[in-house]
Amino acid sequence: MTSPGVWRQQWAAVLLAPCLVFAAQAAEPVLAKGSVKGAGDVQITAADVTADVQRIPPEVRPQVLTQPKTMNLLVTNLYTRRALAQRAQAEGLAQTPEVAAALALARDKVLSDALLVQVDKSNTPADAKLEAMAKTIYQAQSAEFVQPEQVQVRHILIASTDKDTDAAAKAKAEDLLKQIRAGGDFAALAKAHSADPGSAANGGDLGFFASGRMVPEFDLAAFALQKPGDVSDLVKTQFGYHLLQLVARKPKGQQPFDDVKPALMAKVRQSEQQKGRNELAKSLEETVKLDDAAIKATVDKLVAPANPTSATPTKP
């Protein structure tokens, strides 16, 4: 028999599955409809679309929803799937043992996800309490919120990956350095010449970073710059030649609570919700009774087709 500890972990894993957000179905606008041979009347409502888009990550959902072509394709796909489902229903496929079992499992998932949404809501403290709990963590674990010294630099990369391009890359970087030393606009030159696509459009700005985030040669040169506006000599790395300009320095110090509050509140919220899920998992674990012999028989039956018994060779 499987140990209780293992089952608690497995139940908790199941209960950690992403949850669906459910929309009311009554009096919803019809977004697509038609009559399909073998399937009858088919329609897709706003509720169908609302339920379906929950699978799209919230941070990119607005981009998808505001693109007419994408939304039309989404609605069309839902219409096609429903037409196929209604045809399968009409042909009696829902009554076959395999399909009936799959439908039951799908229903179980939808309903269990709905219950987990409810469990999460009931175990989510009010914002004021979340903030107080977050502040307690911030004060108790203050060492975790010490921010190391950071620098913000712009850079220009002249790419060089082999001996054939090295001399030309170095000459170009030296020429740019002369222009900058003569008063040239570092950001404008970065936009025009830098081979780093991630920063060139921003005038070479890499934002703030702590020591150890960049390759060693680059890191050493960046932290050697002292005053905003200071420009490095040429810095050679595995990527080519770099020119660096210091934008700002941020000394080591404690991160303000307001800077970390959103992340801490989210962590506390997740922790409290998980407590509710763990309690539910434990209560379910206490009710389950496994039949190991029946499980083994089922496994043997399932794997048998993949491992057929070799035919007995015939005598010559």
Image (cartoon, rainbow, N blue to C red):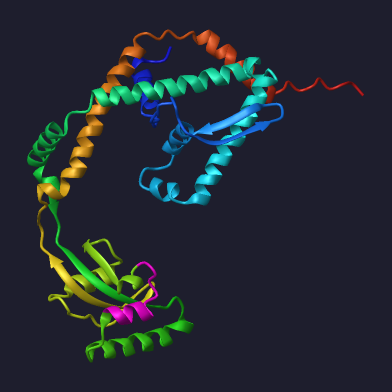
Q: Classify residue 2 by image quadrant.
A: top left
Q: Residue furthest left?
A: 139
Which x, y percent locates residue 10?
A: 39, 23
Closest to the observer: 314 or 62?
Answer: 62
Work out whether 131 lies above or below 152: above
User: Going 63% across and 28% down the picture, which residue do you hit?
Assistant: 41
294 lies above or below 204: above
Q: In this view, does 51 lie above or below 197?
A: above
**196 magenta-colored:** yes
Total numbered circles: 0
Residue 255 point in image, percent of width and height:
11, 52
As drawn, 29 above or below 193: above
Quarter of the image containing the N terminus? Answer: top left
Q: Which residue is drawn at 24% across and 65% down?
A: 207
In screen coordinates, is 196 left or right of 183?
A: right
Residue at screen point 45% across, 31% down: 47
Determine whether, in the image, residue 68 is placed left or right of residue 36. Answer: left
Q: Is residue 36 magenta?
A: no
Quarter of the rendering containing residue 90? top right
Could you tell me residue 98's position as x and y percent? Answer: 63, 18
Q: Residue at x 44, y 27 (%)?
A: 27
Relative to 294, is 265 on the left or the right? left
Q: Position of residue 38 (x, y in %)?
A: 71, 26
Quadrant into which the C terminus falls: top right
Q: Give the range drawn in magenta.
A: 187-198
